[in-house]
Image (cartoon, rainbow, N blue to C red):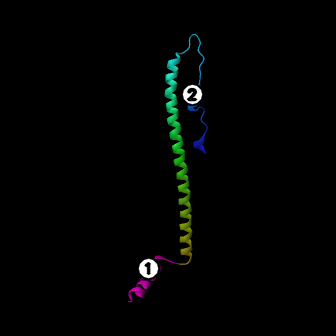
Amino acid sequence: MMYEEKQFLTAREILEKDFKIDARGYRPQEVDQFLDLVIKDYVEFDTLKKKLINEIRALETENSKLKAEVRNLKASLDIAGSKGVTNVDLLKRISDLEKVVYGE
């Protein structure tokens, strides 16, 4: 699925990355501080991504169930319609039942 595409880096890979230092290189502390911020963002992003994937799966499951319910209801309506049952027929049957129950 689209929301499960591969990430190129993990927080651990960022944490464990070592840079080679040459005579004109960057200050290691500055790089480490920046990478710490990147790692925090990555961890937060990964947590949010997993939560959203779970929510998407739950919504897809619910959507499938609702679609099945709609299909069943449509089939029930088609069956009722093919038998010629209308609202007028139902109201007449209710009226007849009321006469029996209430003795009119």
Instruction: Kindly identify the residue that appears in the image at 53 percent across and 56 percent down.
Output: 62
Instruction: Kindly state the secondary structure of the residue where label 1 is placed.
Output: helix
**Which residue is drawn at the image coordinates 51% and 28% (left, top)?**
38
Q: In the rendered view of the protein, which quadrant contains the C terminus?
A: bottom left
State the residue position of label 1.
Answer: 91
Query: Quadrant of residue 4 in the image?
Result: top right
Extent of the magenta region: 85-104
Q: Quadrant of residue 83?
A: bottom right
Pick whichever, 58 or 94, lies toward us: 58
Q: Amino acid at mark 2?
A: Ile
Real-space Cα separation, disc 2 to disc 1, in angstroms: 71 Å
Q: Quadrant of residue 92?
A: bottom left
Residue farthest top in this picture: 23
Residue 8 point in image, percent of width and height: 60, 32
What is the number of the mark on residue 14? 2
Quadrant of the snapshot with the N terminus: top right
Residue ID at (58%, 15%): 21
- Badge 2 marks a residue whose secondary structure is helix
- Above or below residue 10? Residue 51 is below
Q: Position of residue 20 (x, y in %)?
A: 60, 17
In the image shown, does 85 or 67 lie closer to the viewer? 67
Name the amino acid type tagged 1: Leu
